[in-house]
Amino acid sequence: MEGKGGGFTMFDLDLWKEILSALKKNRMRSFMTAFGVFWGIFMLIIMSGAGKALENGVMDGIKAFASNSAFFWTEPTSKPYEGFQRGRRWNYKNTDIEYIKANVNDIEYLAPKLFGSNSNSGDNTIRGKKTGAFNISGDYPEFFEIDSWTVLKGRMLNQIDILQKRKVCIIGERVVEVMFDKNEDPIGEYLKINGVYYQVVGVVHPETRVNFNGNRKEENIMIPFTTMQQTYNYGDVVHFFSITSTPGVPVSKVEMRLKELLKERHHIAPDDVQAIGSFNIEVEWIKYMGLFNGIQILTWIVGTGTLFAGIIGVSNIMLVIIKERTQEIGIQRAIGATPGKVIMHIVAESVFLTVIAGYIGLALGVGILELLNMALDSGGDEIFFRRPEVSFKMAVSALTVLVFAGIGAGLIPARRAVKIKTIDALRDEGI
């Protein structure tokens, strides 16, 4: 118990020999005691990593999407108004585009959209002997400022395509795989889409998984909005509006104003909440952040609860150990060991047991997360579970908690040990 110069330190070699000897005397008991701590920290790491992976998967799918955006479509009216019956079907019109721009402030981008046939409606695209079923839409260039796409080859749609109603298209990677031979350059080639030929001017990759027609975005074929309207006789119908608010303005504010304007313009009851369908990314983003914060809080509650149960187990076992070593403690006190030295010995043993078990749980948990991460890397963009990980800060915090928990687990038994009178400890078999 005595270090160099007669002092007692946590780095005393004799101290650690005594601790290891005490633990080896009953290996099974030491293992079961340590297992509770190991399992607590292991579950904390695994649950935290899994929660982070879910967050990464969802956020990777929407982070490139404009967070200040909202989307609008029409639904049958739910209330009669100005002579119109309940259940009336209606559509946005081309004239709504300029009217919205002129009367709704704080709109940064406004993008009308048309939906054509999709991949579920049968083959709609032909090239030579090859056929395919894809999602067809008519778009404005502004839409790609809201929903980000990366150009792999060629270019995006532009304003000249809109003004001149060019028969051009940009296509997703899946379209290239189906309609073109391997290593064949699709740029400049033609696809026959619903009976009309379009020249491919770009190959694009989606940066988000937000999709409004329910199919893979890699299967999209996008043509100029005006071209689609004219070619397929849509008249002046608009199926869908996308908007973003100007920086610093909540999109919810713009959303309310736009709905009021459209209801007034199309003779819809002001209190008809069904007639205009909408989706607000800003609101959904806040919900997601709240959800993931809640998951992390729940993870810490469950993980620390499990860890606390393990610490209680350590404390109880230390009480049993002290009872078995009553005479040994009495001898130590008889030869001059101070209460502080006895407490230090017991606390050191408790800290050693908890930290070693916790570190193994931490290392194993991180190792499993890394293996899972490697397996998920090969899963493609469709997986909503990505990069399970724990931060360095969390790992350090967990180890710090373990140290203090070990001290706490040892203090109660240690305080009880120093209350044993030397003469009683030498005479009795237990406390």
Image (cartoon, grey):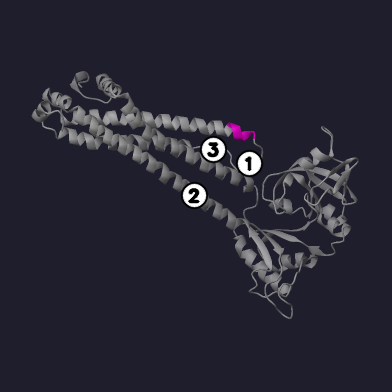
> Which residue bears the numbered disc 2?
293
Q: Classify residue 358 as left or right of residue 256.
A: left
- CA gap, disc 1 to disc 2? 21 Å
- CA gap, disc 1 to disc 3? 12 Å
Q: Residue at x 49, y 48 (%)?
A: 295
Specify the amino acid type for callout 1. Ile
Residue 39, percent from left and from top? 41, 35
**Residue 322 lies in quadrant:** top left
> Which residue bears the numbered disc 3?
388
The residue nearer to you, when weighing 32 against 392, is 32
Name the quarter where the C terminus is drawn: top left
The residue nearer to you, when weighing 199 against 245, is 199
SS category of the residue bearing label 1:
loop
**Residue 11 lies in quadrant:** top left
**Residue 319 lies in quadrant:** top left
Q: Classify residue 298 as left or right of residue 402.
A: right
> Which residue bears the numbered disc 1?
383
